[in-house]
Image (cartoon, rainbow, N blue to C red):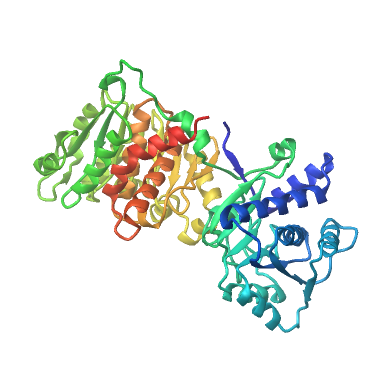
Amino acid sequence: MAFVKLVTGSAMAEVDRHTIALGTPGRVLMERAGRAVVEVIVERWRELADISAVVLCGSGNNGGDGYVVARLLHRAGAAVQVFAAGREPAADSDAGHHRAQMITAGVSAVTLGPADDLEPFAAALARADLVVDALLGTGLTGAPRVEHARLIEALNLGRAPVVAVDLPSGLDASTGSTPGPCVQAAVTVTFGLPKIGHLFYPGRARCGVLRLVDIGFAAEAIAAAPAPARLLTEEALAGWIPVRSGDAHKGQCGTVAVVAGSLGMTGAAVLAAEAVLAAGAGRVTLGVPASLIDVVAAKVTEVMTRPLPELRRRRCLASRGLGEVLDLARGTDCLALGPGLGRDRQTIDLVRRLVPRLPVPLVLDADGLFALSGCLEPLAQRPAATVLTPHHGEFARLSAATLAEIAASPLDLARQFAEGHRVTLVLKGAPTVVAWPDGECLVNPTGNAGMATAGAGDVLTGTIAGLIAQGLAPPKAACLGVYVHGRAGDLARDQHGEWGLVAGDLRRCLPQAILDTYRGGRP
């Protein structure tokens, strides 16, 4: 199963036009969209009879969807008040057709002009049990006009839950930015394909629960739509989860070496190594500075350990340890490098000389990434696949982009870096972006703010390495690792809440996250 496309507002508009050109009338699509919104409302709020609903409609197609919603809510027994912003749609337009049908069904609309008093609108919102936002659609770029902005601000002062049609008004569908006031939705019902703005902050926070529904866009139109990224889904990833044969032994389930740790940062090394096993690999050896071996051995049971040459005074890896690290890597299926290594000059030198010599796939994180800041030549000399897992700050050092530039264009910058350096790039954030060497970009929907805790990235490093060792191609391992890591975070949040979530919770929840993905994505 292919991953779902993530599209811009303009690409989605083209899907709409293409579908209409292929024979599905626009007013039919509008009817289906409105019905889908009402079905989600019924599913969530059950009984509609006697509830009070306010529907705010714009003058475009989004408003047309709102007229359908108002008519169907009225038919279900709700007391519906409709407020229409701006000019009335042309009678022969799709939106005009559905406005006329709504009026015929017995629902009138109050028109709100740019200078009209909003007190009647505010009073209706105060009495409402439910509000439907059908003001602005996917075509918005920039801040809403003043007349729309004041409606959005008034709507956000209301206490009733808001259902947004396609996306919350004020949200840029193509970026996730909110350059002006934006509706805060409890639920967003979107059609056909998810938009980039649904997944990237701050827009993601404005959407509430996102529901994607099929309203019959032509398969040909969807296939032709350009997509700067795709969305990782359970259905597509379930088939990538490695499955052991009944007679498997540990040597057939993948072997990983983790090279990590320094004085005060043994926890990072342990988290990464234990995550390798939690992800399903058969065995892992953790290499740490020699004087720390007893500390690490006391923390782990299932992980093998190996002392490596160190700078005794700093208790970090020494440059002369290159040969022993290469020896450790022999016979493994993947090496994870970086968690808690420290930033001593000798350790940096070790990393720079090691990276181009490793004959196995490499997952590089944390201080391993720091060692390559301003010195990316070792990546070009790699004889095997490489996965880099930087957060935005680490990526800024690697790419020389500013944090503001990364926040504004994470997809483009991740793609350019991955293609230019022939690596798989895991740009950690909310959401995390995975860019493949061939330019494919994928966006992860799992995870939560509780995962903003020390050590979470170390667990991800071990997870990806463990999946690679089990035979998954590094780009696929990065995608699956990111998804189940986020899902483990969601399980941990559901059990303990976001406030006290720690990295060890992610590691403990990882097997269940993998199992849930495997079961949930299979027919």
The residue that appears at 44% across and 33% down in the rendered structure is 519
The residue most toward the right is: 92
Residue found at x 40% / y 57%: 449
Relative to 101, 235 lies left or right: left
Asked if 298 appears above or below 87 in the picture, the reply is above
Report the front residue among 200 and 118.
118
- Residue 82 location (% of width, % of height): 74, 69
Q: Position of residue 345 (x, y in %)?
A: 23, 49
Q: Is residue 306 visible?
A: yes
* Residue 165 percent coordinates (x, y): 66, 58
Q: Quick check: 462 left or right of 69?
A: left
* Quarter of the figure with residue 307: top left
Q: Is residue 170 above or below residue 312?
A: below
Pick out the residue farthest to the top: 247
Q: Is residue 172 visible?
A: no
User: How many numbered marks does the figure carry?
Assistant: 0
Q: Would you say 506 lies left or right of 426 here?
A: left
- Tell which of 379 and 242 is nearer to you: 242
In this rendered view, identify the residue nearer to me: 452 or 398.
452
Q: Please tell me which residue lies in front, 315 or 495.
A: 495
Residue at the image position 31 percent from the left and 23 percent from the top: 253
Where is residue 458? Give x, y as percent: 30, 45
The N terminus sits in image quarter: top right
